[in-house]
């Protein structure tokens, strides 16, 4: 971001606020583009993964090769669909709810380090920001559920509120564990630390436990099966977005896949080294002595490494979704409060002890 | 202690059974080929006995209406004028909106002239197309027309008409196609018994 | 509607809660057709329920009084459309009883074969859709893959994929050959392997057990009082199976098979898991019956020559009445027909198992949660075509 502002100021001669807004526009535009393309790919991937797990083929016709253009066709269809607003709904809230939902997740992308130095905002409190900004989504979902004026939507919204609020606790607790070891809230610090020391997941069994707790509670945060209660198809028809159609519906869809990406990227960054390769200092690759790669090439390698890890976790999320039955609402609460929260704290306390005595599979 | 055992038992069982379930889905993901049949391009094998759309051997049919009577849903409509043993066909329609493909119209036929093909595609954008006429021709065949006119003329004591039949038969373009289909059905039936 | 009066709410205070009335169906993903259940909800908990049926009423019984005995067979297909063979069988047996004839020996064995195959197909749907009701989508597709094999097998002998119209008064429509029986045996072997897979992915899944055990408990007394039959009754611990207790086909006397009953493995006797597990084990019994039937099938004719007259001249049984019940996948299906010597019965009634099993729904739902309500409806395994007829 700062680099970008610098570029605009020096190269294009823009001043102060102009350079800032130009930089923002570029960032937001590219991020929006990335999310859209990613979501289309992820939806296609989800359909393919689901299909092949279910001895089907999934989309095959659109775009000749294995239906790769299916998501594009769907997006175009959704764009052109009539925007239906129920006559008894609260129109203003109905209008803005998808935007609110999407904003929360969109803001989460800001702090994800995609590669060395490729991060829109390098916040000191990156993880803290992520946890807090992700909660905005709940407000949007409740708005959507309430404004729809449908009982099924209301049920979905209430479930979502209860679930997401409950699962913030284990998520935050589990996130504290790597923070404790690395000693920073800044996301890029984790990458650098793991570049030097190896993946955090292998730090201690408690770190693995924390990773598991985070993964499960992030599933609940993303409303992915087996925690897809807010949209539980067989119970609530479609949950909070029952009444939505066309573009507004697609925003909810986009949000779901975007939050999957954020959760997986955080998982990859905090426990699996992010864009780095352990014990390999990628910044030296630009030296003529080693590989003599350009900056762009090294950045691209970083992006590919991060995306590979992220997509692995997205695949696991899909894999779980097509395997497990859905939990019941009280069981979700039981799992959250009786299992994940205590174990999250166990992991936190044990890691603190490990850190104090310098135990663990590699020193820090 | 029961509660504690339950607590840890739940964790163990949840993790192991989830892993087992995931192994099944992964096995299918990697090893099991899809069973999908890409319909318009590939088709499933239709067994010989399939009960599909009907076909009529019109030259055999004697307009006895037994098939229409056997039909539980009254979807067969037959109209023909009898000139002695020759038939002047008006219509022989099956309303596929009603037809339930129960096969009850096949066994009663005394001359074995109505059959079921293995065709099953009924989709159409026009409701009227669902009522299908099984006739290859309507009215009289030219030779029959000629014979009838001759006999009528004979009755009236006039000279036999010299001009050719006026009413040319309609339809009949798909006769070859139909004959091939009927031959196929007969071969099938022979194999069955 | 009397059962569902809103309870009085004190609206004088600033903050008050009230119960919510939720319309589950008739267009809902998990009511298995067009069942409508009116639910009174206290938050997520159901406090009262009333099921509303009749959205698929097609006068199936009245039609029976206007068509001939033979012509009614395809209509029975359309009652419980997932188990057409069994419906055909029940009606054919009723007509045979009216006519006071018995189908040829070979045809009886063929009937057992196809009926048990169809029972597997029907239970596979129950299994697959139950998974979907609980949010597990994948078992559904595995179940449909095996069902597809069964449909292909039955299509080979009957000519139709779902509404077979195969079993007819006096026998069966077509004879079967050895090659077909070999295919059936191959299917049975394959199916037993797949059955283990189903258990790995769904039956033994911890979440699945937690979702179904101790939910919707149907006691033995209640099941008997409401006239529940089939797996729903057996899951409550009553060992009652018409195939075993009143063998309506000769082969059932000669074949060895077990009648699975609920045992309350993971919870209480008669809960959703028991109902599910009884169906699963019945599928295994079916493959065993099929194997024995194929081993013992005698030579003979599939239909008496003199019965083939019925295609041309409608059957006219002597005046009298007949009531014949059969063990369908969903319970006891019975047909009642009264003849006055005419071409069609003057009274024709069906006792539909789904209808009787559904009657307990209103009693099972109160006290459960919305998600459990879906599980209970799924575990009763109703077919609305049969409930409404």
Image (cartoon, coloured by chain):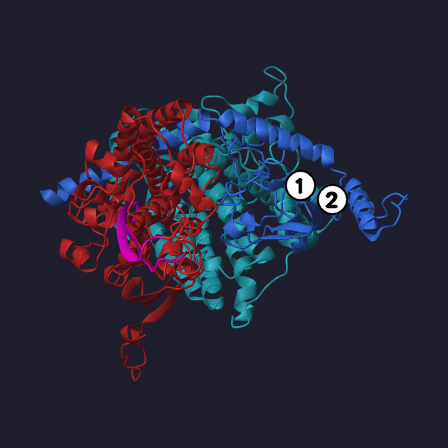
Chain colours: A cyan, B blue, C red
Instruction: Give the residue at mark 2.
Output: B137
Quarter location, residue A138: bottom left
Residue drawn 49% across and 53% down? Answer: B72
Query: Looking at the image, which residue sits at the far front?
Result: B157
- Where residue B147 sits in the image (x, y, percent)? 79, 43
Q: How many marks?
A: 2
Q: Is residue A243 left or right of residue C94?
A: right
Q: Sort mark 2 into few (<14), some (14-19) or many (20+) by Cα contacts within 10 Å.
A: many
Frontmost residue, A259 versus C7 = C7
- Residue range in magenta is C317-342
- Where residue A74 sits in the image (x, y, percent)? 61, 47
Q: Sort mark 1 into few (<14), some (14-19) or many (20+) by Cα contacts within 10 Å.
A: some
- Where residue C23 sits in the image (x, y, percent)? 39, 66
Q: Is residue C85 left or right of residue C252?
A: right
Instruction: Give the residue at mark 1.
Output: B58
Tell me which secondary structure the magenta stretch mostly adopts: strand
Quarter location, residue C335: bottom left
- Where residue A15 sits in the image (x, y, percent)? 71, 51
Chain identifier of the residue bearing label 1 in the image: B
When the figure is inspected, residue A153 is found, relative to residue A45, above or below; the finding is: below
**Could you say whether the residue bearing mark 2 is in a helix, strand or loop?**
loop
The mark that comes first in sequence, 1 or 2, is 1
């Amino acid at each position: 971001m700062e680099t970008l502002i610098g570029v605009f100021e020096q190269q294009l001669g823009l001043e102060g606020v102009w350079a800032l807004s130009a930089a923002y526009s570029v960032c937001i535009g590219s991020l929006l583009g990335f999310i859209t393309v990613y979501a289309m790919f992820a939806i296609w991937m989800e359909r393919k993964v689901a299909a092949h797990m279910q001895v089907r083929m999934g989309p095959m016709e659109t775009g000749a090769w294995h239906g790769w253009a299916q998501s594009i066709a769907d997006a175009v269809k959704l764009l052109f669909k009539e925007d239906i607003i129920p006559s008894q709904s609260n129109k203003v809230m109905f209008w803005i709810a998808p935007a609110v939902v999407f904003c929360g997740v969109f803001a989460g992308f800001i702090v994800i380090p995609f590669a060395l130095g490729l991060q829109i905002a390098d916040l000191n409190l990156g993880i803290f920001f992520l946890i807090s900004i992700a909660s905005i989504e709940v407000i949007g979902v409740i708005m959507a559920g309430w404004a729809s004026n449908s009982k099924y939507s209301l049920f979905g919204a209430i479930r979502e509120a209860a679930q997401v609020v409950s699962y913030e606790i284990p998520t935050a607790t589990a996130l504290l564990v790597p923070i404790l070891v690395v000693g920073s809230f800044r996301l890029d610090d984790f990458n650098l630390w793991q570049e030097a020391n190896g993946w955090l997941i292998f730090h201690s069994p408690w770190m693995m436990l924390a990773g598991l707790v985070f993964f499960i509670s992030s599933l609940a945060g993303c409303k992915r099966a087996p925690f897809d209660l807010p949209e539980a198809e067989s119970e609530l028809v479609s949950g909070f977005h029952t009444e939505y159609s066309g573009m507004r519906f697609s925003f909810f869809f986009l949000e779901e896949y975007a939050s999957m990406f954020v959760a997986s990227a955080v998982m990859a960054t905090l426990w699996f080294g992010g864009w780095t390769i352990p014990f390999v200092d990628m910044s030296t690759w630009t030296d003529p002595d080693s590989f003599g790669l350009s900056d762009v090439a090294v950045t691209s390698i970083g992006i590919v490494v991060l995306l590979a890890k992220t997509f692995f976790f997205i695949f696991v999320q899909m894999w779980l979704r097509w395997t497990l039955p859905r939990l019941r609402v009280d069981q979700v609460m039981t799992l959250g409060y009786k299992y994940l929260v205590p174990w999250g704290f166990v992991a936190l306390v044990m890691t603190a002890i490990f850190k104090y005595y310098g135990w663990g599979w590699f020193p820090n | 202690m029961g509660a504690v055992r339950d607590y840890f038992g739940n964790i163990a069982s949840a993790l192991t059974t989830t892993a087992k379930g995931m192994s099944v889905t992964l096995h299918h993901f990697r090893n099991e080929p899809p069973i999908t049949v890409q319909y318009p391009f590939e088709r499933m094998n239709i067994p010989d006995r399939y009960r599909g759309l009907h076909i009529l051997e019109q030259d055999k049919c004697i307009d006895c209406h037994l098939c229409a009577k056997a039909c539980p849903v009254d979807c067969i409509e037959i109209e023909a004028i009898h000139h002695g043993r020759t038939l002047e066909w008006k219509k022989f329609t099956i309303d596929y909106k009603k037809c339930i493909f129960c096969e009850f119209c096949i066994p009663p036929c005394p001359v074995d002239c109505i059959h079921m093909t293995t065709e099953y595609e009924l989709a159409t954008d026009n409701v009227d197309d669902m009522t299908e006429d099984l006739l290859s021709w309507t009215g009289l065949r030219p030779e029959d027309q000629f014979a009838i006119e001759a006999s009528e003329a004979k009755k009236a004591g006039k000279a036999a008409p010299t001009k050719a039949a006026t009413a040319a038969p309609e339809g009949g373009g798909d006769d070859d196609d139909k004959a091939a289909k009927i031959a196929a059905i007969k071969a099938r039936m022979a194999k069955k018994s | 509607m009397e059962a569902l009066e809103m309870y009085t709410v004190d609206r004088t205070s600033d903050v008050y809660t009230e119960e919510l009335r939720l319309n589950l169906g008739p267009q809902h993903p998990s009511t298995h057709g067009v069942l409508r259940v009116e639910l009174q909800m206290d938050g997520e908990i159901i406090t009262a329920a009333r099921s509303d049926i009749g959205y698929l009423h097609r006068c199936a019984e009245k039609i029976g009084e206007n068509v001939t005995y033979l012509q009614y067979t395809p209509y029975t297909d359309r009652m419980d459309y997932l188990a057409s063979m069994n419906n055909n069988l029940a009606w054919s047996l009723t007509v045979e009883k009216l006519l006071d004839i018995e189908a040829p020996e070979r045809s009886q064995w063929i009937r057992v074969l196809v009926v048990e195959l169809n029972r597997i197909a029907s239970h596979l749907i129950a299994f697959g859709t139950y998974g979907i009701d609980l949010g597990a989508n994948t078992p559904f597709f595995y179940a449909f893959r095996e069902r597809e094999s069964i449909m292909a097998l039955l299509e080979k002998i009957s000519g139709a994929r779902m509404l077979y119209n195969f079993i007819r008064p006096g026998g069966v429509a077509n004879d079967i050959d050895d090659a077909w029986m070999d295919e059936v045996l191959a299917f049975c072997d394959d199916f037993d392997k797949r059955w283990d897979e189903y258990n790995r992915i769904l039956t033994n899944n911890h979440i699945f057990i937690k979702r179904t055990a101790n939910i919707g408990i149907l006691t033995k007394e209640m099941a008997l009082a409401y006239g529940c039959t089939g797996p729903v009754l057996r899951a409550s611990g009553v060992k009652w199976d018409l195939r075993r207790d009143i063998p309506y086909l000769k082969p059932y006397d000669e074949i060895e098979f077990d009648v699975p009953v609920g045992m309350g493995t993971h919870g209480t006797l008669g809960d959703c898991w028991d109902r599910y597990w009884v169906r699963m084990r019945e599928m295994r019994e079916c493959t065993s019956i099929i194997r024995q039937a194929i081993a013992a099938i005698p030579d003979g004719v599939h239909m008496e020559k003199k019965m083939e007259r019925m295609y041309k001249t409608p059957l006219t049984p002597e005046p009298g009445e007949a009531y014949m019940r059969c063990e369908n996948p969903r319970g006891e299906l019975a047909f009642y027909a009264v003849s006055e010597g005419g071409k069609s019965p003057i009274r024709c009634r069906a006792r539909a198992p789904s209808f009787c099993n559904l009657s307990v729904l209103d009693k099972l739902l109160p006290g459960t949660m919305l998600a459990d309500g879906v599980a209970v409806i799924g575990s009763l395994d109703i077919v609305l075509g049969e409930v409404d007829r």
